[in-house]
Amino acid sequence: MPLLILGFIAFFVLAWWWRRSRTLTRNCVWREDRRRAAPGTSFHHCLTCGAELALPLGQEPRHCLRNAQPGPPPHQ
Ligand SMILES: [Zn+2]
């Protein structure tokens, strides 16, 4: 039954991909803070790891900086 095996493989790949994308969004929740933004830039901070990032206007951070920040994470 090659079709059944193929279905199983597709299921596991999809489950792995779904978990991976879900973990990424849960680990990093970027919020824009317009009050702290300098003119011409947009300031973002992460609600989960506390990372802060200033980017050119119109750009949004796509990666969590949890591992790049010094010190322990806020929640353990
Ligand atoms: Zn983060």
Image (tube, helix red, strand yellow):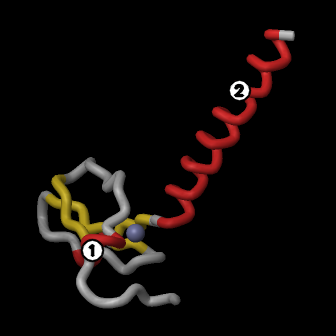
Q: Earlier in the sequence, mark 2 or mark 1?
A: 2
Q: Please, is residue 49 above or below residue 19 in the view?
A: below
Query: Does dot 1 land on a helix, a strand or a loop?
Result: strand
Please state which of residues 6 and 72 is positioned toward the viewer in this rendering: 6
Please state which amino acid type lies under the numbered disc 2. Answer: Ile
Please state which of residues 23 and 11 is positioned toward the viewer in this rendering: 11
Please state which of residues 43 and 51 is positioned toward the viewer in this rendering: 51
Please state which of residues 32 and 51 is positioned toward the viewer in this rendering: 51
Question: Image point 24% across, 77% down: which residue?
Answer: 36
Q: Please, is residue 60 above or below residue 13 in the view?
A: below
Question: Image point 17% across, 60% down: which residue?
Answer: 41
Q: Residues within 10 Å of mark 2 (few under 14, many from 20)?
A: few
- Residue on which the image places disc 1: 52
- Residue on which the image places disc 2: 9
Please state which amino acid type lies under the numbered disc 1. Answer: Glu
Ligand 1 quadrant? bottom left
Q: Please, is residue 50 above or below residue 25 in the view?
A: below
Q: How many marks overall?
A: 2
